Structures are given as structure tokens and as C-alpha cells.
Image (cartoon, rainbow, N blue to C red):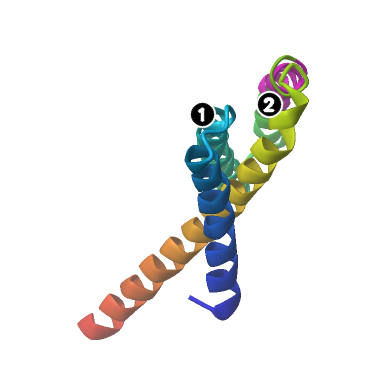
Amino acid sequence: MNKKSKIILAVSLAIIAFMIGKAFILDESSKIYLVIFAFVGLGLAMLRLFINGMIKKMKGKPVGVKVMFFAVLLGCGIPFQNWFRTDILLAMDREYLVPCIVVTVASVFFMTVLSGVISQRKRASQIEEMTIEQ
């Protein structure tokens, strides 16, 4: 794990822990929302990583398959994004909005970097195993 990854992991985890911890210690009414949005951010990061992996697997596929993939992706993603923005974010109390977005973004960064670190370590151990076998 390089220094940049460690810094991003530490800062994002500190932001999440501080925001949620402060909300619970001060018994703020946004505490449950912050926990929910932390998990939403983790889920969004995993979804993004999954979609990126699927796009990488598209190499060599026929154009029709690629068009169909993106049509389904946009057909599901755009309505969901619109629903989330209008019915969830814009319907929330303005006092909760900024802390929830900060926690969501921090958890997206955390999960994205953590996933990269885990896959990097996994690849390194596989390479090590291959060199030992030879």
C-alpha cells in the first residue's frame, strides 16, 4: 500500500468516524441518516467498481452487446438517480443534507481505495505464489 492510499484511507475513515461519532455523542437527530448514508456510499463505491469491471470485460464483445449493456445501465441508472435526487436528497431537511453528502463521499472514497488495496495485495500474493512454484 502506497502512502497516498494510506492517507486517503485514514482521512476518509476519520471523516466518517468524526461525523457519525459527533452525531451520536451530541445526540443529533441526523445520526441515523449519517449511518444510512455511510452504507449508501459504500454501496455506491461497490456498484461503481462492479460496473468498471464489467466495462473492462467488454473488450472484444460485439458492438450490439456493448450498446445493450449501456442501454440497460442508463435505463436503470438515470431513473434511479433522478428518484434519489428528488425524493430523497431534495426532500430531506436542509440541516441533514451537507453532513449526509460528506459522509457519503467519504465512504465512497474509503471503499474505492480499500478495494484497490485489497486487490493489489491479492495480486501480489498470487505473483509471489507463482514465483515460489517455479
Which secondary structure, mark 1?
Answer: helix
Q: Is residue 55 above or below residue 37?
A: below
Q: Which residue is mark 1?
A: 32
The quadrant of the image that shows the C terminus is bottom left
- Does any portion of residue 88 appear in the rendered image? yes
In the image, residue 66 lies at what x, y percent? Answer: 68, 35
Is-magenta flag for residue 49? no
Q: Is residue 14 above or below residue 62?
A: below
State the residue at coordinates (50%, 36%): 39
User: Mark 1 belongs to which amino acid?
Assistant: Ile
Mark found first going from the N terminus, 2 or 1: 1
Question: Along the line of sight, which residue is nearer the eye, 43 or 29?
Answer: 29
Is-magenta flag for residue 81? yes
Which secondary structure, mark 2?
Answer: helix
In the image, residue 15 lies at what x, y percent? Answer: 59, 54
Residue bounds of the magenta highlight:
73-86
Question: Along the line of sight, which residue is nearer the eye, 68 or 125?
Answer: 125
Alpha carbon separation for disc pair 2 and 1: 38 Å
In the image, residue 124 lies at what x, y percent? Answer: 39, 75
